[in-house]
Amino acid sequence: MAKKERFYKEGIVEEALPGTLFRVRFDDGSEILAHLAGRLRVNYIKVLPGDKVRVEPSPYDEKRGRIVHRLK
């Protein structure tokens, strides 16, 4: 079985919500509700409103995803 190719989008964190959830806005104007990936939690990477992030959208729900990388 072939692995599915991952798809990433880059956006800016608009709002920090409880439970490590974040509202991320993309350049095209769409918004997504994203949570931190495990690697970011384990290494205590802080994500604040205004940070640029790379998000992997969920293949099941286009309004949810996970933050996999904080960009500089």
Image (cartoon, rainbow, N blue to C red):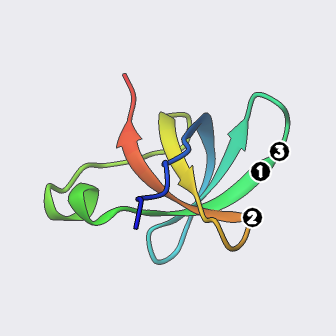
Q: Distance between the residues labelled 1 and 2?
A: 7 Å
What element does badge 2 sit on?
Answer: loop
**Hey, which quadrant is residue 43 in on the image?**
bottom left
Q: Tags 1 and 3 in contact by the CB under 8 Å rule?
A: yes
Residue that carries the numbered disc 2 in the rendered image: 63
Indicate left or right for 31 with 35 as reference: right
1 or 8, which is in the foreground? 1
Q: Which amino acid does label 3 sit on?
A: Ser
Left or right of 48 on screen, residue 16? right
Q: Nearer the viewer, residue 39 or 20?
A: 39
Of label 1 and label 2, which has the lower sequence position? 1
How many residues crowd mark 2 within 10 Å: few (<14), some (14–19), many (20+)?
A: some
Q: In which quarter of the image is residue 57?
A: bottom right
Secondary structure state at the residue bearing disc 1: strand
Q: Tag 3: Cα neighbours inside 10 Å, few (<14), some, or many (≥20)? A: few
Q: Distance between the residues labelled 3 and 2?
A: 9 Å
Residue 29, horizontal then vertical, whole percent: 85, 36
Q: In this view, does 31 lie to the left or right of 50?
A: right
Mark 2: which amino acid?
Lys
Q: Residues within 10 Å of mark 1 (few under 14, many from 20)?
A: some
Secondary structure of the residue carrying numbered label 3: loop
Tell me residue 59's x, y (percent).
64, 65
Name the residue that disc number 3 marks.
Answer: 30
Cβ–Cβ under 8 Å for marks 1 and 2: yes
Quarter of the image that includes the C terminus = top left
Q: Which residue is drawn at 44% across and 69% down?
A: 20
Q: Is residue 21 left or right of residue 24?
A: left
Image quarter (top left, top right, bottom left or bottom right) of the N terminus = bottom left
Q: Nearer the viewer, residue 23 or 64?
A: 64
* Circles 3 and 2 in contact, beta carbons < 8 Å: no
Give the amino acid type for the residue marked by disc 1 in the picture.
Glu
